[in-house]
Each structure stands twice: as C-alpha cells, then as structure tokens.
Image (cartoon, grey):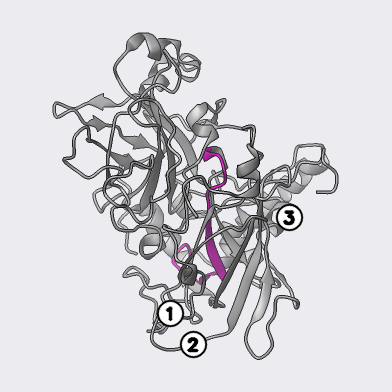
Amino acid sequence: MHSTQPQEKEAAVETQQDLSAEINAMGDAYARALKDGAPAETQPRLDYPPYRSSILRHPTKSLHHADPETIELYSPAFGHQDVHALEADLTIQHNGEPQGERIIVAGKVLDGDGRPVAGQLVEIWQANAAGRYIHKRDQHPAPLDPNFIGVGRCITGPDGSYRFTTIKPGAYPWKNHLNAWRPAHIHFSMFGTEFTQRIVTQMYFPGDQLFPLDPIYQSIVDQDARERLVASYDHSLTEPEWALGYNWDIVLTGSRRTWTENEALGVEGDEE
Amino acid sequence: MSNQTTKLVATPGQTVGPFYGYALPFEKDNELLAPGSPGSIRLQGTVYDGAGQPIPDAILEIWQPDSEGKIVQRTGSLVRDGYTFTGWGRGSVGHSGVYTFTTMNPGPTEPGAAPFISVAVFARGLMNRLFTRVYLPENGEALAADPLLSSLDPERRKTLIARRDPDGGLTWDIRLQGEGETVFLDFQ
C-alpha cells in the first residue's frame, strides 16, 4: 500500500531494531507500572505508536462511559438461514484440496460469567498457507491458492462451541517498517448476546517467534492478556490421518441483561 | 468457572486489518431495507482520520430498533430476503471514505427517549472496535433529557447528532481523532 503521508514514508525505512526498541520500552514501562500497583491492561492500547497506522486513527480523548440502553442490551439474531453448515469447513469450498497444513480450530464462546454464548455468528478470515490474502492490496510475491479463499462462518452450538476446519495460515510481510512480518493468525469476529459484547480479534498459534517483534500483538501490553489470543495445540482435537487440532476459547464481556431460559439454551424464536 | 463469583477476563480485541474486504462484506450488507422502499432513508457520512483525510479501509456496523422503537430479533441479516427488517447492517467505506446504509428512522425504545442508532467502527490502524451512537436531530426535548448527551459538553455532544438531509436521509460523519473527534463509548 503506497501512501503519501510523510509519517508512513519515514516508517518504511525504519528497521525492526528501531521498532523493537519502542515496543520494549513501552513493555518495560508497563511492567514497572504494574509492579507499582497499576491495574492490569487487559485490552490493546488504542494509542500504540509502534503500529504506525494507529497514529492518526486512535481517539485522543478517553472513551466516554455510557450505560447501555435497551437496544444495546440486545444483539442481532443470526440463524441457520444466514449460515450454511458447510461454511465452517474452509477446505471444501473449491474444486480441489488447498495447499498447506490442514487444521481444526475449535473452542467455546463464553460471556464474562462463564455462560455459553449460544446461537451466535462467528466469522473468520485468514491468509493461505503461503501467507497471502485474496485481496488486491495484498501483492507480496507469495502464491495464491486457487483452492483456498480463507473465509468461514458458523453459528455457536447450545454450549457456545464453534469448530472450523481450515489450513494453517502463513506469516506474511507488511509495510509497517522494514522487514516487518505478522505472526500467523486467523481473524475472528463475534457478536455475543448484547451489542456491547461485539468483538473482532485475531487468534495466534503457540510458540511463534514473531510475537515479540509484532506491534499489533504487542499492543496488548499485558503478558497474561496477550496470551489469551494464543490457541493451544490439542491432541484430542487432532484427527488421525487428517488434521492437527487447536483449541481456543473466547470470552466476551459480561451480559447485563436478564436472560430468558430459551436464550440460555440457545433456542431461537422463529428458527428451527 | 466453577466459582460463580469469579468473572472471566474478556478476550482482547485486535485490529480488523486491511484485508477483511473479501470476508466481512456480503450482498446487501448495508441494506436493512431495500433502497426506495416505503419508509426507507439513507444514512451516510465520511470516516476521517486525525489529519482530516478520509479513511478508505474502515467498516461500520449499525444496530437499531424499528421505527416503532421495537427491538427486532429476526434472523436473515446475512441472507436478506428484501422484506424482513433485522435491525442490523454492515457497511464498508469506499475509496472516498464514504459509507452508506439504507435503513429506517429508529423509534424511541421507551416513551420520551431520544431515538438513536448504535454504531461499531472497525478499521486498519484501529487496535480495537469503537462503539458510538448516532441520534436523530429532531425532538430537542428528548435530546436534552438523554442521559448520554446531557453528560457531554456542547461541542462534543454535537458529534453524536446527525443532520437531516432535504431528501429525508441522515448525514453523520465520524472523526477518529482531532478537531471534532467523535465521542466513543465505554460500556464497562
């Protein structure tokens, strides 16, 4: 992506060493503050300059506290008319087998009280095994895979569970700075039962050497908090002669609305 | 989880990135009603960064009651039949930073309440989604009594109120940063 903004031009010649120094300084300052009794920061910092694109795009004023009102205590309803069951398998959407390491990614979506978030839409998107997105602005010279688009959807089960079959995405370069590479990740979008629970995030893979170097992952300055984005390898999810399994649970914020029994069981009013 | 009093810590958000374009948008995603249908209005505006430049790679979602103020809980947002109002829509901004929704005026969810549309903003460079609201410009009394609007100083309050266009539609711009920065909300 070419930009004429001077700040992005400069960013292009910055090295990983420059960026890592900034990342480490912010991480060290946070660790000291935490030791001195500051509260843990469990969400990413909106103002995180090592991610250069955030500089002009983060609000400078504190988020204004609001009590959710009626409409915000609900979220849109999705049903099986919105999503076909086959959309949870990203490896069967085309004529042939996609390239790469086939994986199963499964887990539960829970709210802050540990209740399953049932009957809710989960959307994912990702790069292919070579680290290339099907997007005209992703032009780095890794191969496209004609048998892999990298988009999936599913509706969570009564126990909040979701499950996707896909291909392990590759790491890919980006232009935040010179030699910048994103750790392999799958983008996740979740709705919850209230509008206030809406979240878009990224799931990462365990043991990635790129974690300390990545300004997007490191924008979550708290180690425990950022580890919540890393899936675990789960041999019980692994299927013989077929696919490796990763488990990743997602916790949305707590719900304030009084639940009806039907919702708690994931029963949809006008569906099925 | 075994301890009922223990709250689980929410999973952190991350940027939607620039490459959601083949994944999140879908046919009629921004058409909560068919354009031109009775009662339909256009909600449109531009998303700006701190330098006043339109952002070409943001994506918005709206969620609202119907014109009677009823919260609908109907499925069919992703595969729209053209008739069912589900209250939810998704709109990518285009190259010029402009977004458009076709929807209806929201009604008050409680008598005397100021009607508004809930908005979630996602963008490359934005580390986590932002929540905000857009209020209808009419009914000054209800706007003055609104708990959120009345807690804001007049300059900031303006950022949450749309303009009514001559064709009956609404125009509402979003400024992520800088002069006229939109008020973004924290519900925790």
Residue at 75% x, 54% y is: A224
Q: Decide: marks 2, 1 in contact (CB < 8 A)? A: yes
Residue B166 lies, with reference to residue A165, above or below; the image says above
* Rendering coords of residue B53 (x, y %): 30, 44
The subunit carrying tag 2 is A
Residue where numbered disc 3 is placed: A223
Quadrant housing residue A188 = bottom right
The subunit carrying tag 3 is A
Residue at 41% x, 12% y is: B112
Residue at 25% x, 25% y is: B163
What amino acid is found at the position of numbered circle 1 in the picture? Phe
Residue lying farthest to the top in this orientation: B141
Instruction: Report whether A163 appears left or right of A177.
Output: right
Residue where numbered disc 2 is placed: A99
Cα separation between marks 2 and 3: 33 Å
The 10 Å Cα crowd at callout 1, few under 14, some 14 to 19, many 20 or more, is many
* Magenta-tinted stretch: A174-195
What amino acid is found at the position of numbered circle 2 in the picture? Gln
Residue where numbered disc 1 is placed: A148
Q: Is residue A197 magenta?
A: no
Residue A40 lies, with reference to residue B158, above or below; the image says below
Cα separation between marks 2 and 1: 8 Å
* Rendering coords of residue A96 (x, y %): 42, 89
Cα separation between marks 1 and 3: 33 Å
- Name the residue nearer the viewer: B169 or A108: A108
How many circles with numbers are drawn on the protein?
3
* Rendering coords of residue A259 (x, y %): 64, 36
